[in-house]
Image (cartoon, grey):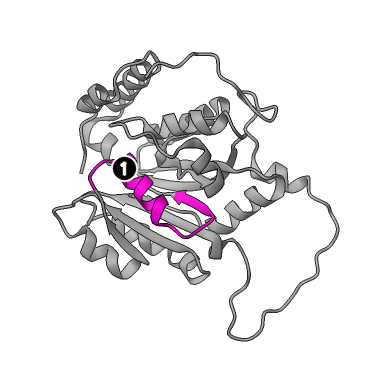
Amino acid sequence: MRQSACCTWSSGFMPGSVPDVRNLRAQRDGAPRRRTRNAPGTRPPGVSRRLSVIVPALNEALKIRATLAALAPARARGAEVLVVDGASNDQTVRVAEPLADRVLRSACGRAVQLNAGAAAARGEILLFLHADSLVPGEFDRSIETAIAMRAHAWGWFDVRIDAGSGSLAVIARMMNLRSRLTGIATGDQALFVTRALFERTGGFPVQALMEDIAFCRNARRIAAPVRLRGPVVTSGRRWARHGVMRTVLLMWRLRLAYFFGADPARLAERYRDVR
């Protein structure tokens, strides 16, 4: 898949201008809000009733429990949680079933699983979360604020890598800066999108690798993204297994090759799975 280096930016969005939701909040009308009480036994209104969290999984029994447990407060507020299993041969499904609203079976392949989850979801807003990542507190309300304040239809969270290495903290900061400057994020950053925009983009392209990059390219042609500080905490297991510099160099090579039109299936052969 070859793409021109010159991109079309909509809504006046240019590289380097991805807004921070805290800056957007400061632009709202400063009029005081009336506090209301909910009737006993009722849930407060909000985004959670409209939000579906989609977690693709493949042999993630060791990680997915913590991921789903972090979603429990949002589920209590009405959010829907779907796990889409890609034919795991471990205990992923068994671990996930009591912690999710539904566990779906799908053909293996992250793009296929993400699209299957989106098709089955009931929410008007979709959050795509990796099975080894932890959402920040009240992430659902942060998404609601971002979407409601200036009609941002999609975005992502900053990321932190869960490891003790100082070098990984630097890598996470560089990932966040890169996304802010380019308007393109990765799946580790918990992409969220309105259903309307997701359907306009055609969903995640069914390809072996870089489906998240391709989705962001398509989405930013339609609407400007928004960045939420979060952060989402993602596993550092790939860096720990293969080494920090080796992994960074590999990802740079893969991204550069993809930019110049390399076949994602060929690239996926070099992106070895880590479990």
Q: Is residue 25 left or right of residue 121?
A: right
**Drawn side of residue 234 relative to residue 6, left or right:** left
- Determine the residue positioned at 13% across, 53% down: 89
Q: Amino acid at mark 1?
A: Val
- In which quadrant is the C terminus drawn? top left
Q: Quadrant of residue 46?
A: bottom right
Task: Residue 142 in the image: state x and y as whole percent.
Answer: 59, 53
- As drawn, 171 above or below 136: above
Residue ID at (28%, 32%) = 208
On screen, residue 195 versus residue 89, left or right, reads: right
Residue that protrudes farthest toward the bottom in the picture: 40
Residue 154, given in percent of the width and then of the height, sits at 56, 42
- In this view of the protein, which residue sits in the foreground, 95 or 87? 87
Depicted 22 relative to depicted 266: above or below: below
Height in image: 233 above or below 74?
Answer: above
What residue is pinned by disc 1?
112
Q: For residue 156, say whether it is visible.
A: no
> In terms of secondary structure, where does tag 1 sit?
helix
User: Is residue 120 left or right of 105 when viewed as pictured?
Assistant: right
Q: Residues within 10 Å of mark 1 (few under 14, many from 20)?
A: many
**Residue sitting nearer the eye, 211 or 197:** 197
Question: Which of the two residues, 212 or 202, is positioned nearer the viewer here?
Answer: 202
Q: Is residue 166 magenta?
A: no
Please report the bounds of the magenta region as a residue range.
107-127
Most extreme residue toward the left is 89
